Amino acid sequence: MRIRLLGPVELRVGADGFASVAGAQRRAVLAMLALRLGLVVTMDQLCELLWDEQPPPTARAAVQGHVAALRKVLADTPFELHTRDSGYLLTGPADAVDALRFEELAGEAEGQAGLGDCATAVALLEEALRLWRGEALADLPETPLRDAAVDRLRQSRTAALLCWAGLRLGQGAGASAVPLLKHGVRLDGLREELVAMLMRCLHQAGRSAEALTAYHQARVRLDDELGINPGPALRAALAEVLADDRTAEPP
């Protein structure tokens, strides 16, 4: 992997490991170009990424400076940065960008699961999830465009996690998915499908009390933050746990 975006933005040059590109704005330019590999990113889009709706008078010159610096650091990599009339274009191997490799692996896993090859799908999803090192684009300036990209990537990770955990549950190995699901719930506890999957995996592992606790915590958080009751996904998971554990009391 040459460009890593699923965590702090890092670039590998030569064989000396990964290093952060100097300057948060420069890393942001690299990240957007890498996420849109093979597509032109306009000057306006780069300015919006860095300054939202209030770019300074020197914005275009600043972007040009970042691009010039990136060309130098990309010189020893398989990537090439081109100038186009409206902006810039990064070319290179998609599998050398971790976010794009993640999407490729998740897509392959979906295809294998559709063919009934659950073991291969599980292996592909595990490889995909291992690419994550924390929150995507973690060290970039917080602008609406950056936040939208982070949200898209987070949703893709959650979808892959849910698919993987569901396959492991179907294999009778839901217990193995519990640690990653708990981490996912800590990050996105309002995603009811995630909590429901955690409950099912905990229950399959013989940890029904923990499953009920997860439901209770989600119910409280939904009420406190959104003012809503648990939806169908959580209610169905609760019913499954209680149906198999007649001594349990709903929280």
Image (spheres, helix red, strand yellow):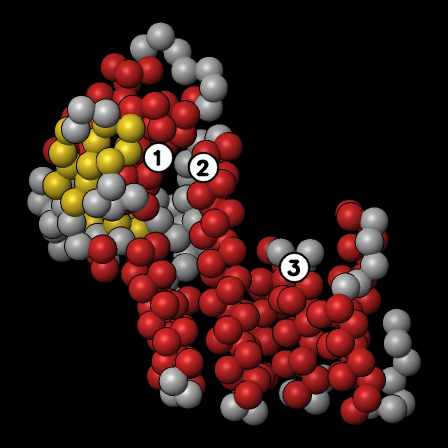
Q: Is residue 26 visible?
A: no
Q: Is residue 90 visible?
A: yes
Query: First in sequence: mark 3 or mark 2?
Result: 2
Q: Would residue 170 appear left or right of 7 to someone viewing this image?
A: right
Q: Which residue is mark 3?
A: 191
Q: Which residue is mark 1?
A: 28
Q: How many marks?
A: 3
Quarter of the image containing the N terminus? bottom left
Mark 2 or 1: in front is 2
Label 3 SS: loop
Which residue is painted at 37% across and 76% down in the image? 111
Specify the label residue 231 is tagged with: none
Residue type highlighted by circle 2: Arg
Up/down of 169 relative to 3, above or below:
below
Q: Please, which residue is most extreme toward the left here? A: 76
- Quarter of the image for residue 236 reads bottom right
Residue type highlighted by circle 1: Ala
Mark 1 or 3: in front is 3
Q: Nearer the viewer, residue 215 or 183?
A: 215
Mark 1 crowd level (few <14, some 14–19, many ≥20, 10 Å Cα): many
Up/down of 23 relative to 227, above or below:
above
Query: First in sequence: mark 2 or mark 1?
Result: 1
* Residue 193, percent from left and from top: 65, 67
Mark 2 crowd level (few <14, some 14–19, many ≥20, 10 Å Cα): many
Residue type highlighted by circle 3: Arg
Mark 3 crowd level (few <14, some 14–19, many ≥20, 10 Å Cα): some
Q: CA distance from mark 1 to mark 3?
A: 28 Å
Whether pointer 3 and pointer 2 mark residues with C-beta atoms closer than 8 Å, the reply is no
Q: Would residue 42 appear left or right of 84 to someone viewing this image?
A: right
Q: Which residue is mark 2?
A: 146
* Residue 172, percent from left and from top: 56, 91
